[in-house]
Amino acid sequence: MKINQWTLGLAAVGVVSLASAVNAEEAKMNALQTALSSTTISGYVDTSIEWTLGNKNSTVQSSIPFRGGTSGYFGGSSSGKNDGFNLNVVKLSLEKAMDESEWASGYKADLLFGPDAVNYNSSVNGIENNNNTGRDNDFAIKQAYVALRTPVGNGIDWKLGSFDTIVGYETFEAGNNPNFSRSLGYAIEPTQHTGLLGTYRINDNIALAAGVANTLSAGINDRADNNGTGRINGQWRKTVMASIAVTAPNDTGFLSGSTFYGGVVCGVNNATGNDTYDQNNYYIGATLNTPVAGLKAGAAFDYADNFLSQKQQAWVAALYTSYQATEKLSLHGRGEYGRLNAAGPDSELASLTATAQYDLWANVISRLELRWDQNYLSKVNQGGASVTGLGLYANLIYKF
């Protein structure tokens, strides 16, 4: 036990006893150990190999919305990843989960390192990139919030700080999704909010959530007028959100345990620099069990109004299938169709993704994926010709 020199000096002249000093130091250590003992550390390392098939012309590839940039297929910047080996992202998560007590408390902090961290506009105080057009550090705080429970009814669970968006079938975490690449729907959804979110479970089958945040777009402590436009009342405009989640009860046969979800987020997309109006994101989705053992089906619909600029819309409909063929082998498919009339020409989009996952190594997700995309470019300067993208991907994720 190490005791500081000041305490030793007081003990030498008889002001305090050495035994009491040792006991005090042990009490401090015990309190620290008690506080840390309930904190869990987890995370993952996400890597990939990507091969672009067919026409590799950069102009052609960029004609497919969401194929590159910070809203790309892969949750972060996908540009520069084609035809090579990639470190996508490293995540480190610290969490103290709430217990079952009425006044429970906890916290969570998710830290991202690597190229895909740029997807999270980490902080309004972050370092600007070389062109001073945005914050593109290879470090980001994905989530960091204090969790609290208040004993109202069945209990309301609160998050105050920065937290993940409440809408969407897929998440930033590739290992938590059925496919490696993200959906087109993911690309039009918000990702992160700084604000206050409350969740209330009515019963075992129905849960509600509602919250308020600074902006619809990512950016810790961002504000509606932080883009420098000086728009009137920007500081006082907030983003609001709400959702409902329903789980099919045990007496619904093979549908038992299936989930249905709906959510809406309405607020300023500060990333576009357009804070004179609100972007509205609407989402409905479901994951259904089927009578076939090991087979699940899913569906999702995303709609964004005032997407990127006023009076522009984007929507995507998607179908999912997942089949657990053996203990280690699972097969996943996704089909999507959408319309985009945001910046540039209107587009009709279609995408098919097939993924095979085989869990050969402990704690490792190993996947091989083939993805096809088509942009029908209903208004284009290329004589109406469609543009096709085809890619083959290998993905290894170690979870700890």
Image (tube, rainbow, N blue to C red):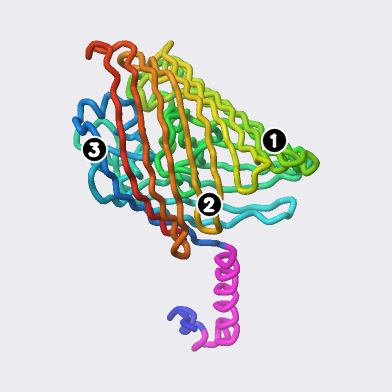
**In the rendered image, which residue does mark 2 sit on?**
108
Q: To which quarter of the image does residue 399 belong?
A: bottom left
Q: Nearer the viewer, residue 358 or 85?
A: 358
Q: Say which label, 1 or 2, has the lower sequence index.
A: 2
Residue occupying image coordinates x 28% and y 50%: 86
Q: Position of residue 259 (x, y in %)?
A: 66, 38
Amino acid carrying mark 2 in the image: Lys
**In the rendered image, which residue does mark 1 sit on?**
246
Q: Say which label, 3 or 2, has the lower sequence index.
A: 2
Whether residue 17 is in magenta: the answer is: yes
Side of 265 relative to 100 (left or right): left
Q: Nearer the viewer, mark 1 or mark 2?
A: 1
Residue 343 in view of the camera: yes
Q: Which residues are magenta?
A: 11-38
**In the rendered image, which residue does mark 3 sit on?**
129
Q: Nearer the viewer, residue 101 or 257?
A: 257
Residue 222 in view of the camera: no
Q: Nearer the viewer, residue 61 or 94?
A: 61
Classify 10 Å Cα crowding around label 1: few (below 14), some (14-19), many (20 and above).
some
Q: Nearer the viewer, residue 25 or 299?
A: 299
Disc 1 is placed on an element classified as strand
Residue 316: give its label.
none
Amino acid carrying mark 3 in the image: Asn
Q: Position of residue 320 (x, y in %)?
A: 53, 36
9, above or below 398, in the image: below
